Amino acid sequence: MAEQPQLHGRKLGDRRVVVDRPHARYFRYLGPGVLEAKLEAQAPRTAQQRRMATIRGLLFGRPLSSAAELTERLPKWKALPVFSSDVMSSVAYATGAMMLILVGAGPDTFKYVLGLSVIVVALLVIVTFSYRQTIRAYPNGGGSYIVAHANLGVLAGLTAAASLLTDYVLTVAVSVSAGVQALYSAFPALEPVKVPLIALSILLVMVVNLRGLRESGTLFASPTYIFIGSMLLLIAVGVFRSLTGQLSQVADVAPLTGVATESMGLFLLCKAFADGCSAMTGTEAVANGVPAFKPVEWKNAQQTMIIMATLLGIMFLGTSYLAVNIGAHPAGFQATGESVLSQVGRTVFYGRGPMYYILQISTMGILILAAQTSFADFPRLSSILARDGYFPRQFALRGERLAFNSGIVALALVSIFLVVAFNGSPDRLIGLYAIGVFTSFTLSQSGMVRHWFSGRGPGWRRSAVINGIGAVVTAVVVVVIAISKFDQGVWVIIIVVPILIALMLFIKHEYDLEGRGLDVAPDVVFGPPHRRQRVVVSAQAMSRAVVQAVKVGETMGEEVQLVHVALDPSEGERFRERVERQLPGVRVVLVESPYRALVRPFVRYLEVSQTEDPDRLTIVLLPEHLPRHWWDRLLYNQNVHRIRAALVGRKDFVVLDTPYRRGA
């Protein structure tokens, strides 16, 4: 703290003292030895840093402090589009997916679509009430991973987590692909560029999510509510026209060709039911994201889940009813042709009028925004896994806008890879879709049964029965999907999930090893150093970097050695003479290397000299060039990296860098 000279005040005899606290601009003093960094403390200094900060500000907004986390919480009207856009959007493709399976046995089999839809909605009711129990029991976030891990063990928890992670990735790929399909159903000229459009849409959703959960909720609310309104109007008008005999058959739809003929039977119905269950993917999102709600979190989450399930049931049943009644036909596996919902829309709304285009554009919007559910939950689940040691630690860190940036970016990149691999076809991706989420449903509900039996609180029997029914029903669905969809790609998920589990266990093992190696017993008191020290500076040439390293070494120990590996004896002697002249008192050790190796002779010298005095600690200083450009990483420091790799972690050696920058 610097004190300024005393200055006269306004009146005779007045004195005033101006006290300058230079750190006050950057830090807030909270107590003795405790400072809080202000936003100014991380302000950019160089012109390039300021340009990048301006771009980040335009894209993502002003950085938020950790204290602003509560203000980022979501009210119910924002939480509904954030956490239910996935499950709401499934009505745009679930009915068509069932019809695509049944068409192999002939269009007459479409009469089973409505019955299958009723079974799916009944399953939705069971799962919804089961997850209401989970929300109440785990008000801090009752995701399938947390519930299964706490009640069924590590492997069950990781299985639920891996299943959800794959489901979130597929949700983004399927929903955005289906959204773009809705767009080129209305505007066929856009079909050739569907893959770039899908990738661009995913990137846009990623950028919005990097701005924070509250902003994404605000931006996504309008498209979601427009879609809900359009769908409810479509169903109301369509059912009224159907009951009054005014609803005509769909026109200008070419019969689907190239579909393998199948005989009607239970197996075919099971396959269609499995695809219809894609309407339920995303049901668990509200339970996973309870901490994102405004207080009282669990109550708001329960109410949001009931609203979500009610709207989904109405829209799914209504779409299936109208699709069957107008004689709609599904689009093919090449993602060409008109979607079932588009056929329903133009039939109910008397052709391609304003309401039809509102429906199609809002459908595209909700399908693209369905990715928002995954972008809300994938990063949160990744952060929990990282906190528990099963994911890289950077996934647990929040960015400037309190978003889990690593998880958001990873989800976007993997989803785009899937879209490119499957050529943007939602029908080809949907075969992989539902098994992951229903596996997590089963494990979560089974964990809840164990939870109720362990706690035995008030009403535990009723709660256990509800969750038990949910576990049994969803387990049956998992078996049905695994068998009926095995040849359509489900085998990929059955392989991928164990691989993910193995990777997470490997990461946990590595972190545990590191933790045990670095663990400090809480009752140990560390005193001053008790070993003598010598300092060794690696030097291949006389330079300012070497001089800097020597001066640093002289502050650390009485003995400083400058070790030079010489390929040419005469060159080595010239190096010794120059050092002794310019750095008097510094001991030079020449290691001649007639076999032209540089690193291994240096390391071997340190090892041999250490055995002469094993009680001594050797500090090795490595002058390291700080790169200014990407090519500097290729041109400099290669020997430094190799020496460090050979010595780091050995008990008698401490390796330190003395960085330098050219022109500094």
Image (spheres, rainbow, N blue to C red):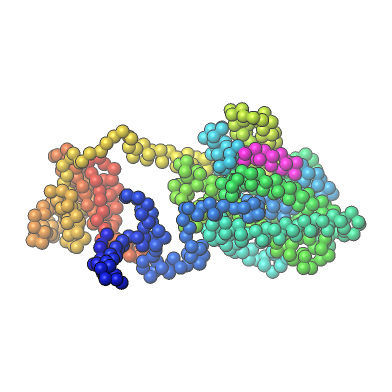
Residue 476 shows in the view? no
Q: Decide whether residue 129 is among the magenta residues.
A: yes
* Closer to us: 636 or 377: 377
328 left or right, relative to 279: right
Q: Main secondary structure of the magenta part?
A: helix
* Closer to us: 622 or 645: 622
Q: Decide whether residue 633 is among the magenta residues.
A: no
605 left or right, relative to 491: left
| Label total for image | 0
- List x then y, in percent, for residue 546: 19, 59
The quadrant of the picture occupied by the N terminus is bottom left
Q: Residue at x 16, y 42 (%)?
A: 532
38 left or right, relative to 462: left
Residue bounds of the magenta highlight: 120-136
The relative height of residue 394 versus residue 134 in the rendered view (above or below) is: below
The relative height of residue 54 versus residue 393 in the rendered view (above or below) is: below
Quadrant of res 298: top right
Q: Residue at x 58, y 58 (%)?
A: 216
* Closer to us: 619 or 59: 59
- List x then y, in percent, for residue 271: 73, 43
